Image (cartoon, coloured by chain):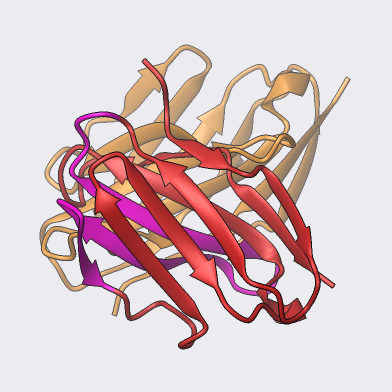
Amino acid sequence: DAGVIQSPRHEVTEMGQEVTLRCKPISGHDYLFWYRQTMMRGLELLIYFNNNVPIDDSGMPEDRFSAKMPNASFSTLKIQPSEPRDSAVYFCASSLAGTPDTQYFGPGTRLTVL
Amino acid sequence: AQKVTQAQTEISVVEKEDVTLDCVYETRDTTYYLFWYKQPPSGELVFLIRRNSFDEQNEISGRYSWNFQKSTSSFNFTITASQVVDSAVYFCALSESGSQGNLIFGKGTKLSVKP
């Protein structure tokens, strides 16, 4: 079975540009999570969805970040406008049920904002 | 408040040595879950194990073993006869039963296994 799929794997953009990260969860998983990983702050939960509905977005750093899940097999994380401090690895994860069910992670998107 | 501490930032061993990665957690809940993930140099996060707070039996999977002790709030991970392919960053994580999406990660321990 396919795991969590993320695209692109690498993204380099200039400050002020819009960035869209994409995620396809494991089929049948009802929960989808977006994380950010930086050296300074480690792994942080940004937002998660249950059955396509955002449940907790308290980890979203600011209004420049937004996430959507239009259907059960696709989610996006958008940053507009991007800033150099947004440079990080962004992971998407999915789980069959809510925590504490196991979250399976995608390969991540490494974002560099110049 | 929930918290996960991995005091060892980096560990370096020679191949075939045994190595233990420490994880200490804090939680007020009586029902919670603990996880270990591996992040190899390629960057992906690989699930290793999930343990609930009511199951204190130690777990063994091949060269990997986990020691869960509620009395000391620890969930340590031992690799026996380490191999170069074990080189990675290992994360311990905690989730309380009612928290749904809130998986709290430790800062990780970078393990380097030298040939």
| Residue lying at the far top of the rendered structure | B62
Residue B24 appears in the figure: no
| Residue lying at the far right of the rendered structure | B115
Count of numbered marks:
0
Q: Is residue B82 above or below residue A46?
A: above
Q: Nearer the viewer, residue B96 or A88?
A: A88
Q: Is residue A42 above or below residue A6?
A: below
Q: Is residue B34 left or right of residue A92?
A: left
Q: Is residue B91 left or right of residue B101?
A: right
Q: Is residue A39 left or right of residue B50?
A: right
Q: Which chain is orange?
A: B
Q: Which residues are magenta?
A: A27-56
- Helix, strand or loop for the magenta stretch, by majority: strand
Q: Which chain is red?
A: A
Residue B51 occupies which quadrant of the picture? top left
> Could you tell me which residue is drawn at 58 percent across and 46 percent down?
A108
> Could you tell me which residue is drawn at 41 percent across and 16 percent down?
B61
Q: Is residue A47 magenta?
A: yes
Q: Is residue A21 magenta?
A: no
Q: Is residue B34 above or below residue A41?
A: above
Counting from the top left corner in percent of width and height, residue B92 is at 46, 50
| Residue lying at the far bottom of the rendered structure | A63
Residue A98 appears in the figure: yes
Residue A74 occupies which quadrant of the picture? top left
Counting from the top left corner in percent of width and height, residue B52 is at 19, 44
> Could you tell me which residue is drawn at 20 percent across and 49 percent down?
A100
Q: Nearer the viewer, residue B81 or B113?
A: B113
Q: Nearer the viewer, residue B31 or B99?
A: B99
Residue A102 occupies which quadrant of the picture? top left
Look at the image and tell me in which quarter the C terminus of chain A lies.
Answer: bottom right
> Could you tell me which residue is drawn at 18 percent across and 73 percent down?
B28
Look at the image and tell me in which quarter the N terminus of chain A lies.
Answer: top left
